[in-house]
Amino acid sequence: MSEIRFPLPDVGEGLTEAEIVQWRVAPGDRISLDQVFVEIETAKSLVELPSAFEGTVSELLVEEGRTVDVGTPILVIQTDAASGMSSPDAAPAPAADAPVAAPAAPAEATPVPAPTGDEGGAVLVGHGSSGPTQSRRRRHPAPGGAHEHLAPPPAPPTPAPAAPAPARPAASAAATETPARPAERHDDGVPVIAKPPIRKLAKDLGVDLSRVAPTGPIGDITRDDVIREASQASVFRNIQTPELPADRETRIPVKGVRKAIAQTMVQSAYSAPHVSVFVDVDATRTMEYVKRLKASPDFAGVRVSPLLIMAKAMIWAARRNPTVNAQWTDEEIIVKHYVNLGVAAATPRGLIVPNVKEAQAMTMVELATALEQLTLTAREGKTQPAEMQGGTITITNIGVFGMDTGTPILNTGEVAIVALGTIRQKPWVVDGEVRPRYVTTIGGSFDHRVVDGDVASRFLADVASIIEEPALLLE
C-alpha cells in the first residue's frame, strides 16, 4: 500500500480557489480509476473531479462548504500496489459528460493542468456517470519533447491485501448514474436519487429532498419536483402564523459566483464610462413570425421565442455598426468581425453570461438550438469556464421578469449590451388610428470610449427595425 495526498487541482482559466460542494466518497470507501469523488464549485462553474488512482479512501481533509486554494491537499488515498495509470503517457478521462478536470498529483506535488479537448454532453449549467470509465486521453508533450506524466507509486515487495470495501446499499445500474447519499431516504425507505445540480437547487430553496416525490425516469428527483415542493411549502408557510427568525440579521458569505459577479460589476462600472439609450418598438410582426416558426417542421423540437429574433437582430445590426462589437485595450480598439453572442442567464448560483460562439455564421435553426442548449446548461449549473470566455457583445432578457427596460452594466471586455424588455399589448398609433399592438422597450448600454452617441443610436435603431419587421433579415 502507498499513501497519496490528492491536492485541489487547477481546473483552468486561471482560477486560484474552489469550494468543496459535495463529497462522493467517505473514509473506508473503495475508489476506482476515473471515478468522480468530489464536486467543487469555482467562481464560474460546478466541476466534478475524477480520481487518478485506485485504492481506499482513508481521510477527507476538507469539509463540505469550505473554500480552499489550488494545491491544498483535500483527500488521502491508500493505493493498491498495482494501481495508477496504465502507461506513462496516459491520463484519466473525465466521466462521459463531466467537465474536464486536472488529475491528481502524488505526494502534494504541483497539480498537472487538465488536458484540452472536446467536452461532450454539455447542456445553460454537466454531470456524468460517477462510475469508472475505461477511456484514456493522451497528454500533450511537454517542452523539449518529454511527456509529463504521473508515475504509479512503487509496489512494495509484499503488498498487503486491500481492505474490503464497506457494504453499500444495492442500487440499479440506472441509479448509479445519479448517485444518492446512502443514508438519505424517503419516508417509505426508498433511497433519494438526485443529481448534484438538483441537490444544490434544493439547498438554495430550503427543500428537504427526503420529502420530495420523485417523477424522474429512474425514480430520481427532477428540477420540477424541487420547484413544486418549494412552491407548496411556500403556500403552506403563507397560511401559518409568520415566525420571525431567531437572529436579527442573516449573513451570507461572499464567495464563488457571487464574489465573481461583484468583482466583474465593479470593474465594469468603474473602468468603462457607460452611456445608455432606449427605444419603444412595435413587436407585433416579431410575435407573428415566432408563431410561424413554431409551426414550421424545420423547428420541430426546438424552442422558439422572441429572444431568437432579438439575437438575429443584434448580429445584423452589429454588422452594420461594427464598432459596437469591439474591445477597448487602452492602446487600441479591437473590432471583432465575428460575434460570440453572450446571453445573461439568471441561475440558482447567480448571474452568468455564457456565449454562443460564431453566432454570425449560424442559421436561424442553429441559433435557436444553441440558445436553448446554452439556457438549459446554465440553469442546471453545468456551464463551463470556456463557455463564458471570449464574448464580444451581450443580450439580457429582462422581459422574462416582467420588466419594461433597464440600464444593464457592460460585460467586462465588451463595449455594448442590449436589454430586451417584456412584450405586452398596448395602445399604439398605426396609420393615424390607435390599435392594440405588441410593444416592447429595448435599452442599450455602451462604452463611451469606443461608441459615440450617434453610433449607439444607429445600432439600437437597427435592432428595433428588425423587431418591427423581421423580413429585413432576408435582405
Image (tube, rainbow, N blue to C red):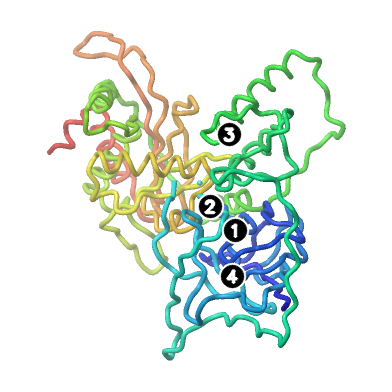
- Which residue matches tag 4? 52
**Foreground pick, 154 / 213:** 154
Q: Which residue is mark 2?
A: 129
Q: Quadrant of residue 137?
A: bottom left
Residue picked out by circle 3? 219
Tag 4 near tag 3, CB within 8 Å: no
Q: Position of residue 438 (x, y in %)?
A: 32, 18
Mark 1 and mark 2 in contact? Answer it, CB < 8 Å. yes
Q: Earlier in the sequence, mark 1 or mark 4?
A: 1
Residue kind at label 3, given as amino acid type: Gly
Residues at marks 3 and 2 touching, judged by CB atoms closer than 8 Å: no
The local secondary structure at tag 1 comes to strand
Q: Is residue 187 left or right of residue 223?
A: right
Q: Which residue is at a point 58% across and 64% down the rendered structure image?
A: 15
Q: In front here: 424 or 210?
A: 210
Q: Is label 4 in a helix, a strand or a loop? A: loop
Q: Amino acid at mark 4?
A: Ala
Q: Within 10 angstroms of label 2, few (less than 14), some, or many (20 or more) residues?
A: many
CA–CA distance in space, label 2 to label 4 = 16 Å
Q: Compared to 51, does 380 lie above or below?
A: above
Question: Cα distance, mark 1 to mark 3?
Answer: 22 Å
Looking at marks 2 and 4 on the same chain, the residue that comes earlier in the sequence is marked by 4
State the residue lying farthest toward the bottom. Answer: 144
Could you give the CA–CA distance between mark 1 and mark 2, rounded to whole angstroms?
Answer: 8 Å
Spot occupied by residue 28 in the image (x, y as percentages of width and height): 76, 61
Q: Provide residue 142's location: percent of width, then percent of height.
A: 46, 84
